[in-house]
Image (spheres, rainbow, N blue to C red):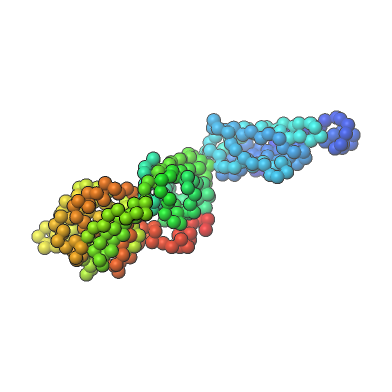
Amino acid sequence: MVLKGVVTSVAAVLVTAGCGLVGGHEQAAKVSITPANGTSGSRPDLPIVVTASTGRLGDVAVQGGGARIAGAFDAAHRQWKSSRTLTPATRYTVRATAKAGGKTTTATSAFQTLTPKQTFSVADITPMPNETIGVGMPLIVKFSRPVYNQADVERALHVTSDKPAEGAWRWFGRQEVVYRTKEYWQPHQTVRLTADMAGIRGAKDTYGTKDYARSFTIGDSHISDVDVQSHRMTVQVDGRTVKTTPISAGKGGQRKYTTTNGVHAVMGKHSPVTMTSGWEGVTDKSDPNYYSLTVYQAVQISSSGEYVHSAPWSVGSQGHENVSHGCVNAPPAFAKWFYNLSRRGDIVKVSGTDRELEPTNGYGYWQLSWTDWLKGSALH
């Protein structure tokens, strides 16, 4: 049980002459510490507070779980607060000094944080540790349990980069939060994510118990433009056009055969990939619309089955007409080159169709304006 309204107070009475005399005696510094000495079941998401009601605080040292807890003084050095949450089920010790009238008072407190009824953790972070990613790559954090105190969790997530960029988190449901920059990442730099989850109260009686850290490298800028109307694809590397090629996109007629329009970010790549008509609901091999095709050098740009891939069977149509079921068909030599170039987070912009890429289709987050993106942040 948490002991409420109890603080440790030290008031040493020193007999001396000079200023600060009270009844002929110099008043000693008075220091209080919350949580109080002997407290068990302290909430780890509440700060440690050290206050000098008289005098001025000197040193404050907090130890727990083998680490020192940082904090900050107010301008007058009358109060100190810890700057982060504590680890559940952990014993902490606090030692603080204060001065008044040239005399030093020392106060201490030892307390135990509560053992939570339930815990939650970071179940997955995308990208992978030390992965080299493209300039449009989002950072995706998934949690093991639903998060209801989303603002507290979001405050504990920190993203830094060698080349500063404006960015924000956006929630997709209760167990996934995504970080996107306002503009694309600048290339050739390192990005670091820290998730200070230990002690964060994610929901009622549910606390995080562990911190997480991950870093990534932003590689070259790879931005490709696919023009469905002119049947051309152009690739830029660090702002310079390096290759163009004829392509054939979705044949249209039905929504499912229309290549999605908008800003895609590469999700991954595979060679080979078996593509079947099952995604269209056609599983009967006797159906004339049934197919099962092995495809090579396939770069995925959506979760609805769209790839930029090698298509030697449609070379005659590439540059002239759209004949695919939604993918971007490319000449084999170009497809091999593009496959080797591509990494997760590279940008592929498709224009010229009437089917917009949904923001939740793959990494379609760039489809949201910055204003709309911010609306999904718990911190606004």
Instruction: Name the residue located 48 percent from the left edge and 52 percent from the top edge.
Output: 165
Given residues 8 and 30, the one toward you in this image is: 30
| Residue in the foreground of this view, choosing between 188 and 269 | 188
Which residue is found at the position 53% from the left and 38% from the top? Answer: 87
Q: Would you say 2 lies left or right of 299 here?
A: right
Observer able to see residue 264 = yes
Can residue 297 be seen here? The reply is no
Q: Position of residue 325 (x, y in %)?
A: 21, 62
Q: How many numbered dots are placed on residues in this image?
A: 0
At horizontal 19% and vertical 66% (from top left) the residue drawn is 321
**Residue 152 located left or right of residue 307:** right
Q: Residue at x 26, y 67 (%)?
A: 229
Residue 329, x across and y down, in percent: 21, 58
Q: Position of residue 77 (x, y in %)?
A: 71, 41
Q: 373 or 347: nearer the eye?
A: 347
| Residue 367 in the figure: left or right of residue 375 | left
